Structures are given as structure tokens and as C-alpha cells.
Image (cartoon, helix red, strand yellow):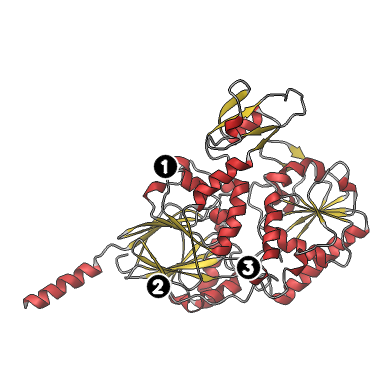
Amino acid sequence: MSMKLEMLCVLCVAALCAPATDVTFFGGAGEVGGSCALIEGEKGKVLVDCGTVYGDESDASDAKEPDGFGFKPADVDALFVTHAHADHAGRVPQLVRSGFRGTIYMTEPTRRLSDIAWRSQVLYDDSYDRDWRWSVRDKQGTNRWYAVHWRSDCKWSQKVSAKNRKEYHGRYAGLKERVRKFTACRTCAELDVADVMKLVKTVKYDEELSASGFKVVFRPVEHLPGSAAIYFDDGKTTFAFSGDLGTSRSRLANPIRPSTKVDSVFVECTYGDKSKGDAKDAEREYARFSDVVSGAMEQGKMVWIPAFAMDRTQRLLLEVLRCRTRPSALYSLSTSGNAMTDLYAENPGWFPEGAVAPLKSPEPPVKRRFDPKKDSRKSAVLLTTSGMMDMGFSYGLLEDLVPDTNVVVCIVGYQAPGTPGRELRTRTNPIVLADGRKIQVGARAECFDCFSGHGDAFENDKWLGENMKSDIYLIHGDPDALKARREGLEKRHGAKATIVEKGRRYHLGKGK
């Protein structure tokens, strides 16, 4: 064998034996929440998403590193965010606080939405200990509220004198037990978010960027403003993460494009292998929503709609404004939800023409304060967060509104196991809260599927398109949904799909 041929053989063998890109999921595998994929290539480590875990899915007992990540944030070079929903981006501030100092890539709408979401989220984050401090000066009465700080560089925190200062080291839940009436400092929250925003770099759809040995492209998927599927090329193999895929049933989404051809694709399975019907079916469901709301208004009842602050609140507000009978009063209590409504109204170019115009000046005007003892007797619509009723305004109103027979509760989205929303959806009575309290259900619950921004199995089939013959990995779904989705893909398309396991390393490319 000649030297040149021998050298060529050596190079070929080396190429075939070159290390593969590895992908390990630390969330979003076998569950809907907590999307977080670690990609390890020859030249570095990057993440796709870093989301909050919901309900009974929350369990960091198997984590090998602090904060429940399962990896060292400081070792990661870059983070790519598919979109701004909490189950995909909610733990980004925690990631930064835990030592991540790489670049965070996202689209401009995702940056704008995340900025609002994180400012609210860090106020109530119970994932880490903080050095809380507050002043007790002139606040000895039983009805006094305290402004509580945790950032030493906060100008208001620095004004708390040593003489009047009270302190507590611990988590948010422990602070709640110690100080019953307090507000967490929004200036401290802004400083936390500013630390994250320093690392953010915005990208445009379809423009290629390079990071840690990967060529990366964001492509639109119409789930919510700025949402993207993210495509990678390591020089040996190509692969993509769907993020959350949009649906033609949404009145705020443009038509979704099919995916670009890749060797491997990680695709969400929120709805498993179910069909949610076509646009006509969605219109019938919107009409039923209008009938339920209008009927309640005509009977002098109150409609309570627990919803996510981002996208869901805005879509519901638009549908309420389309009802044949509008409420005499309209309440939206979430500061972040209202800020996002304003953001939608200010950026009509993110949506189909005219879609968000009613948000400019809603009629009736939106009120931002609500007294459950008085206002629940009106023909009113109340929008609150969270959508699963397990925290925030929704959780705080459960005992006042769920027993009330004058209330109609509209369940408008996915409800994770272990949340009050799941118990209401399954007609459990009484519902049992996480702290053991039981609440008898007097309110009528109505469930609607038309408000989800997720595509169903058949829409997601269309998105997969020519990738049906690629290596398909199923993520972001309940175990039963994932199994059904795998069987449906095989039956309809002869596709071979793998259900991703949390913590397992998957090898991509020729070296797998």
C-alpha cells in the first residue's frame, strides 16, 4: 500500500471514529415542563432551553450539581432559547446565578417577552437561599406591609438602617412564614434580570451564526411571538430542536413552515397522537366559549379564567372582547400579563394583520384591582395567573372563588398532574391543595382546547415533512402521550421514533 493511500485510510478511519455530538436531556424528557438539553460537541458545550418544571414533575432529587441542573452551568458556552414560555426559559435567571457566563441567543420578540416574564418570576423564585432584609420603622401595626429586599446593590435596600433592619437568610417560602405581609422589591428583581440581559444576543430568523463549533439557524414555528425551531450543524451531522410548534387554530399565528431536512430531530409531543381538529373545529370551540361567557354575563355570574400571563392572557382577552354579550366589568390582575398585553398592542407586525387591534383600547376598560368579597357577584370576567392555579393570583383566589356557585371557571390550557387546575378539569371534589387544605367545589368548570398554542399530532406530522425518515426523538410530553405519538408515527408514516429518557446521553452522527 502506498504511503498516500495509507494516509488516506488513516484519515478515513479517524473521521469515522471521530467523537459524535452528544445530547442529554435534563428536563422535558418524559414530562412536559423543564425543557433543557445539553449538547456536547468537539469544541464545547451548549444548551437548548432552560425551563421551569411543573406540578408533580418537579423533582431535583437525582441532580448531581447544585440548583438541580445535573450539570455545571459554568462549563456551558452558550444557551439557545426556543421561546419565552416558562417551561422553556423560566430557569434562565437561575442558570446565570449558578455560574453560567456564556452567550444567550434568542429572537428579539423572545427577548422582549422574557424581560417581562423574568421580572415577575424572580420575585417569587423559591429555588435558592437569599439574604432578605427589610425595615420595621413605623410599621408596628397588624395590617402593615413590608418591602423586602435581597440585592445589596439595590438603592432601596441600602436605605434600610441598621437600627431598623430585620434580616432572614433562606428561601422565599421560609420568608412567607416569617413575614406574612410583604412585597418583594421590584428594583432587586430588575437588577437580577439585568444580569441576565447582559448575556443576551438577539438573532434573526434564517440567519446562520457560529458557536462552539456549531452552525446554528433559528426558523419560525408560530407558537408565540419569536418562537423558533433551532437547527444545528457540527460538520458531520445535522439536527434540530422543534421547541413548541404552533397551530392553525390560533388566531394570532401565521401559517407554519415545514421543517428543514436534518439527520436527527427532537420534536415536542404535548398532545401525544391526538387530533384537535381543523380550523373549522376551532371556530366552533371559540363560539362555545362565547356562548359560555355571554350566558354567564346574562345570568349575572362571574367568569374566572386562570391563564398564563404570556400569550394566553392576550388571546383570551381578545376572545372576551368578541363575545356577543360583553361583561360589565373586565379584570386582569397580573402585572406581567398586562405588560405583555401592552407589548402585543405595540407590535402588530408580529401577528396577522389586524389581529391585535382591539387590545389598543379594550371596551370595557381593563381594571387591575379585584375584591373577591364584592366583585365576584357581578357579571364580570376575571383573568388571573397562573394558568394551572398552583401559584400567583389564581392560587390566592381558590378559597374565595372555587366554592362560589355564582362563578364559572374556564380551564383553557394544559394542567399538570398535582395542580388545582388538573383537579378541577377532572371534576375532583373537593380539590386538595399542596398544603393539604381541601376546597369544596361549587363553581361550574368549563374546559376549552382551542386556546392552546400547540399543534396537534397531525399538524406536527406536516411540520416533520421529509424528516419522517430521519432519526426522530420524542420530548416534551407525558409518558402516555409520548408512547401514543411513537405508535402513531410508525403506523401512519413508517417512522422510527425514540422516546427520550431524562439523563441518558444520545450520540448523534456517524460516531453514534
Mark with earlier residue (2, 3): 2
In which quadrant is the N terminus drawn?
bottom left
Badge 2: how crowded within 10 Å, few (<14), some, or many (20+)? some
- Return the residue found at the far left: 2
Disc 3 marks a residue whose amino acid type is Lys
Number of the front mark, 2 or 3? 2
Q: Is residue 55 visible?
A: no
Q: Secondary structure at mark 2?
A: loop
Nearer the N terminus, badge 3 or badge 1?
A: 1
Q: Considering the image in quadrants, where does the C terminus appear?
A: bottom left
**Residue 116, image x and y in percent?**
62, 53
442 and 496: which is toward the camera: 442
Residue placed most toward the observer, 497 or 346: 346
Q: Say few, some or many: other residues with alpha carbon within 10 Å of mark 3 (under 14 / 14 to 19 / 20 or more).
A: some
* 194 to the left or right of 21: right
Which of the labelled discs sits on residue 263, or is there none? Answer: 2
Relative to 181, say whether 395 is above or below.
below
Does the rendering let one see residue 372?
yes
425 over 246 or under it: above or below: above
Amino acid at the residue labelled 1: Glu
Q: Position of residue 247 (x, y in %)?
A: 63, 71
- Which residue in the protein does label 3 denote? 274
As measured in the structure, the alpha-carbon distance from the residue carrying label 2 to the one carrying label 3 is: 26 Å
From the image, tell me which residue sits under label 1.
65
| Rendered image: mark on residue 239 | none
Q: Quadrant of residue 298?
A: bottom right
Q: CA distance from mark 2 to mark 1?
A: 32 Å
